Structures are given as structure tokens and as C-alpha cells.
Amino acid sequence: MLTLTGEHIYLRALEPEDLEFIYQIENDESIWEISNTITPYSKYLIKQYLENAHKDIYEVKQLRLVICNNLDKTIGLIDLFDFDIKNKRAGIGILVKSETERQKGYGKEALKLLVNYSFKHLNLHQLYCNISEDNTASLTLFKNQGFKEIGLKKDWNLTNGSYKNEYLFQLINNNVY
């Protein structure tokens, strides 16, 4: 089982016990904009997803990890997606579910852990993320972790009847492991 440990949080693989937590996240309309979700997910589908979560990133092209604080409380999720082994890149996304758990450095620490894992163990050359222009917390987080803004996608996402721009950020691995 994959566990990445930081000072205040750790990242772990998905477990069957995460069903309710993931169900709540996937069905929270207030965050659908972040994940480009437009329909709810059933517990049945999420249970099937969890049953296959043990599969290797090289097979399923994604890795979802749970963010837990040092009190073993599940507080969020961090993902690698669109894993492209040929070009050695992947997208990265993060969510700290509860507003009371945000702005405490947990996202920063989780992002550092996953970036390090991606470059050192998966031997990726680059990571990228897509962030809505009005998601100032994520813009700040990724900028502060060395991600560079490389583009602006105009009118990219339709949300509540209006289009929003989306930034594309990239982090290139200049270290040799």
C-alpha cells in the first residue's frame, strides 16, 4: 500500500472505507466546477471504482490518494490523471474538502509530497494543472510550489450560464534522479 508521509499530513491509497467520503465529494455540486462533473455518482459506481483502485497507474493512467491529517482524519484527495508514460507527464489535481481544513498548509504539503513522488519514483518530466481564473487559493498554491503559468484558455468552462477562463500551469522536472 502506498503511503507518503509529511510533517502534518500523509497520503495513502484508497480503501473501501473511503466510500462515504468519496460519495460526498463526487456529489457535492459546489465543487463540480473544479472537476468538470455534471451528474451525480451512485454509491454503487463509487464502490466499483474503489474495488479497482488497487490497479497500477501504468494500467489505469491515474492515481488517486487520500489526504489524512496526523489524527488519521480524512481531509481531502489528490490525483494524478492523464498519466502519459511516453511523454513522461501527468495532470495533477487537489481538493481539501472542508473549508475548516483549508488554509492550514495541508494542500501545500500534499502537493509537495505528490510532486516529489511523481518526479523521483514515477520519473515524470512534467506535471500540469488546469485552474479556473477565480480559484485564487489554487492559483496561489500552485504558483508557490513552482508551477508556471503557460497559458490562458479563454471562455473554457461554462458555469452557471457564463463562461470562465482557465489557466494552464506546468512544472518541469529539472532534477535528475
Image (cartoon, rainbow, N blue to C red):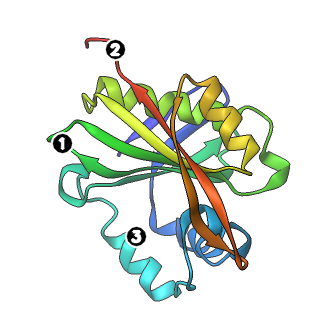
Residue at coordinates 43% horizontally, 84% vertically from top-left? 45
Q: Residue furthest right?
A: 100
* Residue 84 percent across, percent down from the top left: 23, 46
Mark toward the start of the polypeptide (1 vs 3) = 3
* Residue 111 percent across, percent down from the top left: 55, 34
Kindly identify which numbered label has been placed on residue 174.
2
* Residue 33 percent across, percent down from the top left: 64, 67
Specify whether 51 is left or right of 5. Answer: left
* Along the line of sight, the residue nearer the viewer: 54 or 144: 144
Q: Is residue 53 above or below residue 102?
A: below
Residue at coordinates 53% horizontally, 67% vertically from top-left? 17
The answer to whether the residues at label 1 and label 3 have Cβ atoms under 8 Å apart is: no
Residue type for callout 1: Ile
Q: Nearer the viewer, mark 1 or mark 3?
A: 1
* Along the line of sight, the residue nearer the viewer: 70 or 144: 144
The answer to whether the residues at label 1 and label 2 have Cβ atoms under 8 Å apart is: no
Residue type for callout 2: Asn
Count of numbered marks? 3
* Residue 99 percent across, percent down from the top left: 82, 53
Q: CA distance from mark 1 to mark 3?
A: 23 Å
Residue type for callout 3: Leu
Other-residue count near label 1 (Cα within 10 Å), few / some / many at <14 / 14–19 / ≥20:
some
Q: Is residue 38 above or below residue 103?
A: below
Kindly identify which numbered label has been placed on residue 31.
none
- SS of the residue at dot 3? helix
- SS of the residue at dot 2? loop
Query: Which residue has dot 1 on it?
Result: 85
Kindly identify which numbered label has been placed on residue 50.
3
Q: Quadrant of residue 137?
A: top right
